[in-house]
Amino acid sequence: MKPFIVQKILNEGTSEPFFARMMCQNLELRDFVINGEEQKKEFDELYEPLLNNLIECRQAMKECIKLITEHSQKINSGMIISGQEKAWTIKESVDKDLNRNFKDFFIKGRIALQCLDKLSKYMGFSIGFFFQKDKNFDEQVKTIADQNKDQKYQGFLEMLKNDRAIWYTLFRNIRVEIEHSGFNLPATKYNIDSTGKGQALFPTVDNKSIIDFLNLIWGNLFEFCEDVFVHLVDLKLTPPAIMTHIPESKRNPEMPIKYRIEANVGS
């Protein structure tokens, strides 16, 4: 196996599932199907921008959460409120930074998906049709399903259909608004009582708080990138090697990987 050095990133380590799975786990899976130093170098050159953009996407989400949490605490305590009843002044605004990081989340996420598409082409099964219009996507799914009856392909296609329905369409629509329609989150509003203590009323997205919404989209985006890669590896595996899913209760807390490859000795 090619040595892979895991450095401490953003004050986090391999106990964080994202880093454990997207770095340690996936590089181990790579070594089962990508042979030769030159081929691994080619792979790494495609995988690195995927990983980096996911890290930047995740960091943008964390910045949004930090801005909302800290600003709410300051408003609740009255720390950044001055004046008197009916004439209160908020000394700090987070709207500009919140908007910038919210947009960065979608832009970096989009770039990560583009990198995933390039990686999928390199690994022999392009997922480019996933990003096409509904009609083209449905036609490609049917064609691939008709040509590949193997359960591995059928399961992969089912996963892609579910992800489009559950989160990707919403992600795409907001990303398009950001890049082409001048999208901005509505301004934060405030409720302040007679003592100068108040509450920050942040806008919602898809009827969810910004924090809940970003956590939901991030979880889906991260797991989509992981699952696509795992399926791509699985398609290239030959017996007796099999892809094994590790139940959450049995994952090592210090390295909580989700998948590993084992030899199916009993087959």
Image (cartoon, helix red, strand yellow):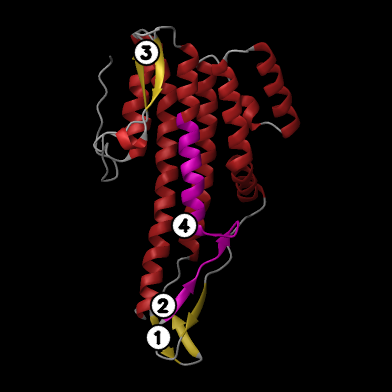
* Circle 2 crowding by C-alpha within 10 Å: few under 14, some 14–19, many from 20: few
State which region is magenta. 198-226
Please tell me whether mark 1 sits on a helix, a strand or a loop: strand
Please tell me whether mark 4 sits on a helix, a strand or a loop: helix
Q: CA distance from mark 1 to mark 4?
A: 27 Å
* Circle 4 crowding by C-alpha within 10 Å: few under 14, some 14–19, many from 20: some
Q: Amino acid at mark 2?
A: Lys
Q: Which residue is mark 2?
A: 91
Q: CA distance from mark 1 to mark 2?
A: 7 Å
Q: Earlier in the sequence, mark 4 or mark 3?
A: 3
Q: CA distance from mark 2 to mark 4?
A: 23 Å
Q: Is residue 19 left or right of residue 89?
A: left
Give me the residue at 65% from left, 26% from top.
129
Q: Is residue 15 above or below residue 178?
A: above
Q: Nearer the viewer, mark 2 or mark 4?
A: 4
Q: Quadrant of the N terminus?
A: top left
Q: Which residue is mark 4?
A: 211
Q: Which residue is mark 1?
A: 82
